[in-house]
Amino acid sequence: MIMITSGHLWQDGNLQLSPGLWLKNIFVPMFGQTDWQGRLMSIFMRLVNVIIRSFGLLIWTAIVALLPLFWLAFPIFLVYMLFSSFV
């Protein structure tokens, strides 16, 4: 169940950040600027967006990947704390 939830969380993060969509439209001019300056600025801005959004998705992937580990470690931690309180 936790793995399915983690998968859905990752999909939601990918849907929100969507670096692939920005990469797909990297050569489409922004705001209808079809001159070379507008196209160059569009490519630069979208490239920066792809880099930042990919980095954000990488961080989100690391957080979501650690979630099942915390889910498994929490009961072990509780049992440890319970036994250590009796000693």
Image (cartoon, grey):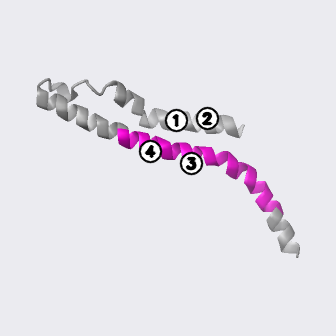
Disc 4 secondary structure class? helix
Q: First in sequence, mark 4 or 2: give its number.
A: 2
Which numbered mark, 4 or 1, is in the foreground of this view?
Answer: 4
* Callout 3 amino acid: Ile
Q: Amino acid at mark 4?
A: Gly
Q: Quadrant of residue 43?
A: top left
Q: Label 3, label 2: how many angstroms apart (C-alpha)?
A: 12 Å
Which residue is disc 1 drawn over?
A: 12
| Marks 1 and 3, the one that precedes in the sequence | 1
SS category of the residue bearing label 1 = helix
Tell me: 53 left or right of 40: right
Residue where numbered disc 2 is placed: 7
x and y percent of residue 15 in the render?
Answer: 47, 32
In the picture of the structure, the residue carrying the numbered disc 3 is 63
How far apart are the two marked residues, 1 and 3, measured between alpha carbons? 13 Å
Residue 69 falls left or right of residue 63: right
Q: Main secondary structure of the magenta part?
A: helix
Q: Residue furthest bottom?
A: 87
How far apart marks 4 and 2 lie (CA) works out to 17 Å
Which residue shows up at 19% across the image and 28% down it?
31
Residue at x 61% of width, y 35% of height: 7
* Mark 4 surroundings within 10 Å by alpha-carbon count, few (fewer than 14), some (14 through 19), many (20 or more): some
Q: On the rendered image, what quadrant is the N terminus found in? A: top right
Image label count: 4
Residue found at x 77% / y 61% = 77
